[in-house]
Amino acid sequence: MSALRALFAGLLAWTLLVAPVSAVIETYEFSSPELEKRYHRLSQELRCPKCQNQNIADSNAPISQDLRQLVYQQLEAGASDDAILDDMVRRYGEFVRYRPDTEGAALWLWLAPVALLGTGLVVLVLMLRRGGAVAEAPVLSDEDRERLDKLIAEDDQ
């Protein structure tokens, strides 16, 4: 049992020592605080092409490191935020943005859920107005009613 504890303690110590080393720490010297704010805002807006559910600020993927470096270089070269975003979209497609434009093909991505929901509501209202899908019970004739009463009476005996 003590060997198992020693192994566990060794694994825990190794994890605590190695985990900080695997984190990527990048420092950039910005020429102004305004550029640094823009850098952080842009790196939050751009999605990692590899990770897909992380922005480039949070991702440790090599491509995210390259994109952060590219954003830094473009900011320092005087590029506007729109120019940087347009360049990234040109390279990686509209998917690289967490908030895609509401124009062109991306407009369908924004409107499709609304259109489907509206269509569903219209179908629901029409079904409710028509009485739904419930069929009315047929009316029994006097002859059929007598036969039914006879069958029920026989079943009770």
Image: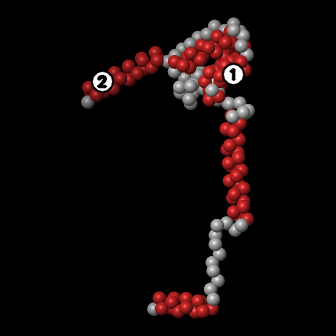
Kind of residue indicated by mark 2: Ala
Q: Which quarter of the rendering shows the C terminus?
A: bottom left
Q: Is residue 44 visible?
A: no
Residue 93: image quadrant is top right
Kind of residue indicated by mark 1: Asp
Q: Which of 92 and 59 is in front in this view?
A: 92
Q: In this view, does 58 lie above or below 155?
A: above
Q: How crowded is mark 1: few (under 14 residues within 10 Å), some or many (20 or more)?
A: some
Q: Residue at x 72, y 20 (%)?
A: 82
Q: Nearer the viewer, mark 2 or mark 1?
A: 1
Q: Which of marks 2 and 1 is nearer the N terminus?
A: 2
Q: In this view, does 15 lie to the left or right of 45?
A: left
Tell how many labels: 2
Q: How crowded is mark 2: few (under 14 residues within 10 Å), some or many (20 or more)?
A: few
* Residue 62 rendering spot, x and y as whole percentages: 52, 18
Q: Residue at x 58, y 92 (%)?
A: 146
Disc 2 is placed on an element classified as helix
Label 2 and label 1: CA atoms lie apart by 55 Å
Q: Mark 2 points at which residue?
A: 6
Q: Which of 59 and 133 is in front in this view?
A: 133
Q: Residue at x 26, y 30 (%)?
A: 1
* Residue 61 rendering spot, x and y as whole percentages: 51, 21
Q: Name the residue under label 1.
A: 86
* Residue 94 rendering spot, x and y as whole percentages: 65, 28
| Image mark for residue 157 | none
Disc 1 is placed on an element classified as helix
